Image: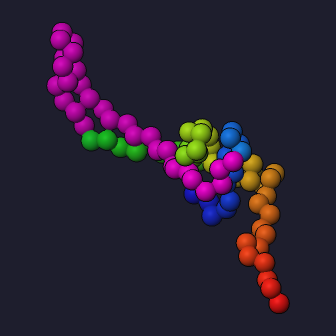
């Protein structure tokens, strides 16, 4: 994952709550007659070129680049949260 700002391209309100979605594969063998699992193997992670990101506000899932590009199109303008009284 990149150390850059994200912005949800779907709800356009979330800049902070995200999760990474990963995919796993698990091989198994079944009995052809009754469908019971006869053998199960260890789960392995499926390699992905780019991680999928999920917005925790609207549940939208997309590749990381979509969230990065949306943040670049609409950058966060930093403003002081407390005024200075001098």
Of residues 13 and 46, the one nearer the viewer is 13
Q: Is residue 37 left or right of residue 19?
A: left
Q: Position of residue 27 (x, y in %)?
A: 30, 32
The answer to whether 86 appears left or right of 25 in the picture is: right
Q: Which residues are magenta?
A: 13-41
Q: Position of residue 6 (x, y in %)?
A: 67, 54
Task: Spot the residue most to the front.
Answer: 85
The front one of 49 and 77 is 77
Q: Quadrant of the N terminus?
A: bottom right
What residue is drawn where x is 32% and y is 35%? Answer: 26
**Image quadrant assignment for residue 15:** bottom right
Residue 69 visible in rendering: yes
On the image, the x and y values in percent for residue 14 come to: 65, 50
- 79 shown above or below 20: below
Magenta residue check for 12: no
Specify the quadrant that holds the C terminus: bottom right
Q: Residue at x 81, y 51 (%)?
A: 73
Q: Is residue 44 left or right of residue 14?
A: left
* Residue 66 can be seen, yes or no: no
In this figure, what is the number of numbered marks? 0
Residue located 18% across and 19% down the image = 36
The residue nearer to you, when weighing 62 against 79, is: 79
| Residue drawn at 67 percent across, 62 percent down | 4
Q: How is the image coloured?
A: rainbow
Q: Position of residue 34 (x, y in %)?
A: 17, 11
Residue 20 on the magenta span:
yes
Tell whether 32 sits left or right of 1: left
């Amino acid at each position: 994952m990149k150390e850059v700002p994200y912005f949800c391209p779907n709800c356009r309100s979330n800049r902070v709550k995200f999760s990474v979605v990963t995919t796993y594969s698990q091989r198994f063998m079944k009995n052809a007659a009754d469908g019971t699992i006869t053998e199960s193997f260890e789960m392995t992670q499926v390699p992905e070129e780019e991680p999928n990101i999920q917005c925790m506000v609207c549940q939208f899932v997309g590749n990381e680049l979509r969230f990065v590009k949306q943040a670049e199109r609409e950058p966060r303008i930093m403003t002081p949260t407390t005024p200075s009284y001098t």
